[in-house]
Amino acid sequence: MSKYTVAALYHFTKFEDYKALQAPLQAVCDQHGVKGSLLLAFEGINGTIAGTRQGIDAVLKAIRALPGCAAYEHKESFATEMPFLRMKVKLKKEIVTLGQPSVDPTAHVGHYVKPEDWNDLIAQDDVVLIDTRNDYEVEIGTFKGAIDPKTKSFGEFPDWWENNKSRFHNKRVAMFCTGGIRCEKSTNYLMGEGVEDVYHLKGGILQYLEDVPQENSTWDGECFVFDSRVSVKHGLEEGQYELCFACRMPLAPADFDRPEYEHGVSCHQCINSHSEDRKVRFRERQKQVELAKKRGLQHIG
């Protein structure tokens, strides 16, 4: 049985004094044993947290009491083990970094499309489908026929659009991301660039994988998530991927059999990226992780 509730959330609203919200929100999370990460900025809140049902409910109630957050939505899934080591409430310039000061999702965004209507939309000949996530996320799963901008970070998306927008003349643009937050900004950005018909998947990939039966799905692969589960499948079941400690990239089961893989030290994606001195430190850390596990403790490094 799943022991922990995992809540992913974001909400764009104007926090006039967001710095003053940090300590009280951290205190509520600590009081109820909730772990994960929450980002606060002038433009709103974003994050993923995990804990007991009672703990998550207490934190969600506290967030709902924040200015402008009474009607925010969140997405829940479940985990058999605590997917986070600690709790951090962080202050940021943006809750998801696009680097475009003129972008304001509270002003207007693209047309929301429910998961049950998504397949019909993206099947249309005049619709171009764009994945707004980073390259390593796209690599393990995406919608069939989606365009991969091959960005390393969300902040690269505006440059990619500028260099490729001529390809999409007279097209309607449909975009998607993990939970919806990146599309709030990317659709607002495209509308500011003069694109008239912009759509995005309501609730993101996670909502689609929960609502759309696998036999009707156009999703191919798994969906990367930013916690220790690494990926989820249809029905939001935990996926098969794990992270490489050295580079934090997702690895499929077959990758562990490759000669470049050394547990806690390297994989085929980073074998040549670290010095031997650093690999020695990684090996020592891995020894400490294994010793802590034998003692029934959780190693935090």
Image: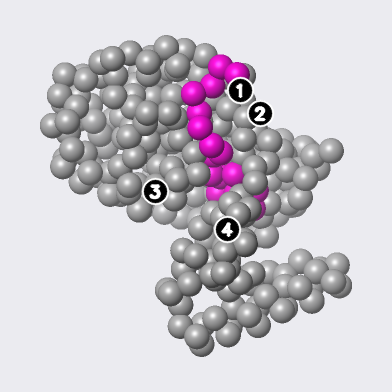
Residue 226 falls within the magenta-colored stretch? yes
Distance between mark 1 and mark 2 Cα atoms: 8 Å
Residue 216 falls within the magenta-colored stretch? yes
Q: Do the residues labelled 1 and 2 touch (CB within 8 Å)?
A: yes
Q: Which amino acid does label 1 sit on?
A: Gln
Identify the mark at residue 135; answer none if there is no mark: 3
Instruction: Tell me the crowding category of disc 1: few under 14, some 14 to 19, or many 20 or more residues within 10 angstroms, Cα based.
Output: some
Identify the mark at residue 295; answer none if there is no mark: none
Badge 4 element: helix
Magenta residues span 215-231
Earlier in the chain: of badge 1 and badge 2, it is: 1
Distance between mark 2 and mark 4 Cα atoms: 25 Å
Q: Is residue 189 visible?
A: yes
Distance between mark 2 and mark 3 Cα atoms: 24 Å
Image coordinates of residue 235 in percent, x first then y, are 66, 28
Q: Quadrant of residue 50?
A: top right
Q: What residue type is labelled 2?
A: Gly
Image coordinates of residue 234 in percent, x first then y, are 62, 30
Q: What residue type is labelled 3?
A: Asp
In-front residue for pair 253/296? 253
